[in-house]
Structure formats: C-alpha cells, structure tokens
Image: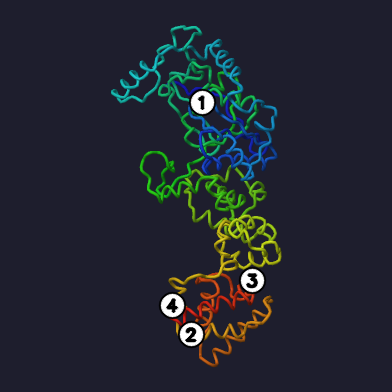
Amino acid sequence: MPAPTMIRESKVMTDSPARTRYAPSPTGKTHLGNLRTAMFAWLLARHSGGQFILRIEDTDQTRLVEGAQAELMDAMRWLGLLWDEGPDLGGRGVPYVQSENLPAYGDAARNLVARGHAYYCDCTPERLDVVRKMQQQRGQPPRYDNHCRERGLGAGEGRVIRFKMPTEGVTICRDHLRGDTRFENALIGDPVILKSDQFPTYHLAVIVDDQRMAITHVLRGQEWLPSTPIHQQIYAAFGWQAPVWVHLPLVTDFQGKKIKKRDDGQGADEEYAKYVEMTRIDTLREKGYMPAAVMNFLAFLGWNPGTTEELFTPAELSAAFSLDRLSLSPAVFDVDRLDWFNQQHLRRLPPAELAAGALPYLKVAYPDAPRLDDSGWVDRLLGAVKEELITVGEVAEKTRFAFIDPVDYHGEVREHLQSAAAEIALNALREALPAEDAVSPETAEAIFKTMRAALKTSHNLGGKAIMQPLRAALTGVSGGPHLTDILVLIGAGAARRRLDQALTAVVTGAL
C-alpha cells in the first residue's frame, strides 16, 4: 500500500485574527443557504478581529445573470454582512472580480506546467464522452484517463491545461469540523485548471485568489469536500500553505433533502414553491423581516452558543461565535422558526425603530390618513398591535381597524353580532361615549369598566358576551388589540358611527 501523499498541513488559527471570504458566483437571486455561509465567515472575522472579504467568482461566463452581482451585494448590505475589502472598496487583493484577473491565472497555470505539475491537453469533448461511457460500462467512477499526460504537448489553440494529480496513494484532507478525510488519488483524475478560452476553472482560480488575498480560513458548503484533495495538491505544487477548511453541512427541507429551486423542472407544487421563495432575501425584505432576526435565525442553522439563550443581536453573535460550536448535522429551513425569531426581535424594538420600519407600509396602505403624521398616535397604534406582529409587513392589515370602518360582517364576527347580548352591549357603549371625539386611555378604561359592571348587574352578562360583539362592531374582526386601545385610537366619533352601522344591521336582520 503506497504511503499517503504528504501535504503541508493547513494552518489552524482559530484565535488569531482571521481573514475570511465569501466568494459567490452571480448566477441568480441571493438565498439564505448561501448567505449562511457568508455569515459564518463574517462572524469568524468579526469575532477574531480579522477581515471579511467579498470576492466575485465570475469565470463561468455561461451561467452569469445580469444584475445578480448588484442584487447580491445589496442583499449582503441589508443583512449587515459588510465587507472590509471587495469590488467596491478595493484592498490588498485587488482585483476582487475574477474576470478582471485572467492574466494571473494563466501565468499560474503555465508556471505549474513549467515545473512539471501540469500539462496541455487537446482531448475533444467527443473523446471525453466516449471515455466516460466506457468507464460507466465497466462500473468505474468517471474520471479523465490521463491520455495527454505523457504526450508532451505544447501550448496551442484549443488546448486546456490539466493539473497532475498523484496516481497512487491517498490524499488526507483535514477539516476543522470533520477531522481527516482520506481520498484515493487513483479515483480522482487530472482536472482542467485552465480552459481553452483562457478562463480558469474553480480549482485554480480559488487557490490563486485565496493565496494572494492571504485567506486563513475557507468556510464553504460540504458539496466542495470532494474537491479538497485537488485543491490541497495544487497548494502543495505551488509550495503554499493551505488555509483552514471548514465544510458546512447543507440547509435542507423538511425531508432532509437539498432545497430544490422553483424552476428546476421537477414539478414542485405551489406550496413547495412558496416555501422556496421564503429562502430568497428579496422575498424577506418585501415581507418586512428584520435583518437582525434573519441573521439570528441563520446562526442557529448549524451553530449553537452552548447555552439556552436563543436571541442574539449581530454584535452578540460575533462575540459568542466559535467554529467549535458549529454542527455537522444538516439544518432544516423552518419558516415557523424564522417567524418566531422575527416576532421576538420585533417585540424588543424601541417605539421609534418600530415606527421607522412600519410607516412606509402604513403610508402605502393609507396614503390619506393624516394621523400618520402624529408620532404619538402612531406609537400608540403600533404599541397596540406589536405583540401580534410576526413581520413589520403585516402592520397595514393588523391596524386596518384604525383607518377603515367595517363594511360587512362574516364568520365569527357575524356570529358575535347575532348573539342575544349584542344589541344590549352596542347600545350600552354608544350611550357611554363622551361628546368630544378624543378619548384618553383613562376615560376609555373607565367606560368599559363601568359598562361591564352595569351589564353584569342588569342583565347578568359576562365579559365575553359584552366585549365580543363590541369588538366585532368596532373593528370587523374577532381578534386584535384591547378595546380600550381601539377606542382611544379611533375616537368617539368613529366608534359611534361604527356602532350605529352594526346596530342597524342587528335590528334589521341584515347580517
């Protein structure tokens, strides 16, 4: 048995300042699975006092989507994953877009050829297809058969450069989470590192860039683990020290499978399509999720702080973060869990911050509402519904009662107004309303307290029998804020108008 291939070990620096990077390809909309990787890299850099770098890997020109890079960078800014070096900032690793650095990759590939670690190959796609089919027929894993390895080809049009992988022994790759993984070299084959159009493949470009940018830790998805022996051998061929590798487990759906894209042609049903849409940053922004809550949710997809605490601000996450607390188990993307995090973060918001987030939604829904210019009234309105909100995007619907009179009654609301106590309760509140429109919290509380006591004595009516039809008449829904808040917010005039409308419907049987 040949001895394992000796590779210089990756540098393990988990306490020193880390230089990490996120290196996406701009091939579509940004989703949470990718940003979780970016976030862990960002957290490690912030926790260690290091730097976080954004690099755009656009060498696969056939898959690029126009506008995707700008959308990606905007999504990262929204989430709070601000980079220290990148395409828009510059830094020690300029350029930060791979297509702007093609000469360097060509030089690196030819350097490997000159030193006997790589070679030119002129195999056609047709020949490679034949080789692949023959290997499949023999039950062999598909790999390049090294046909051009000893042919001594020179540079020429239409030729690629392949890296020479060892043909015997094993390459042992060390991962910070997974420990050592052994790869049989004979099963890997010689990968292309420079294509005939002079664009590098991922295998070469990622190593050249990580080296020149002095990246110390590479956090990436576990799907890249099979590529690690190639990368490790290329590092050794250059005489460079490999970074610390951290291969993160997948984010899966509830069946433990990789989340399918909506347009993958596999006929995902509408419910699953909506589930997938919730992984998109633009969807979350539109619905009014909070960046800090989304980050908190993402952090717990594969990491834990070692305590029972679950709610963290970004600053608290970076202070608590450790690579050693990452999990090897796949993480399930649970929308209910995301909603819980967002609801908890919303409840912690100071009134001014909640108002700043809610007002844009309210002004779109109710553009002619003058009270939206009254900060005190807005704070009271948002305070009344704050506990019900999952996202700030729900605020327009949850506060509808404050702006629009009910126009009809359905379901539970109708049943409440058809109850035996409805007419009694509606008349009692109407008679108790003050002449002036403005109602203070103290006055509202006193009105309801006095009315409940009086109706208990005169008609033996309990709280629900009284309050349910009142809520139905004042709001047109069966749930929501406390009735005292509703009365203060809408005022006596609107309350009287709504009670009159409901009483008419009750008396005439028009429900």
Which residue is rendered at x = 37% and y = 39% of the image?
265
Which mark is first along the chain, 3 or 4? 3
Identify the disc placed on residue 421: 2
- CA separation in Å, label 1 and label 4: 66 Å
Secondary structure at numbered mark 2: loop
Image position of 144 with respect to 475: above or below: above
Amino acid on which disc 1 is placed: Gln
Identify the disc placed on residue 489: 3
Which mark is first along the chain, 4 or 1? 1
Quarter residue 353 falls in: bottom right
- CA separation in Å, label 4 and label 3: 28 Å
Instruction: Residue lying at the far bottom in this picture: please name it.
Output: 458
Q: Which residue is mark 4?
A: 510
Foreground disc of the pair 4, 3 = 4
Secondary structure at numbered mark 4: loop
Amino acid on which disc 3 is placed: Leu
Circle 3 Cα neighbour tier, 10 Å, few/some/many (<14 / 14–19 / ≥20): many
The image shows residue 54 at horizontal and vertical percentages of 62, 34
Amino acid on which disc 2 is placed: Ala
Circle 1 Cα neighbour tier, 10 Å, few/some/many (<14 / 14–19 / ≥20): few
Asked if disc 2 and disc 4 are in contact, CB closer than 8 Å, the reply is no
Which residue is rendered at x = 58% and y = 76% of the image?
497
Identify the disc placed on residue 61: 1
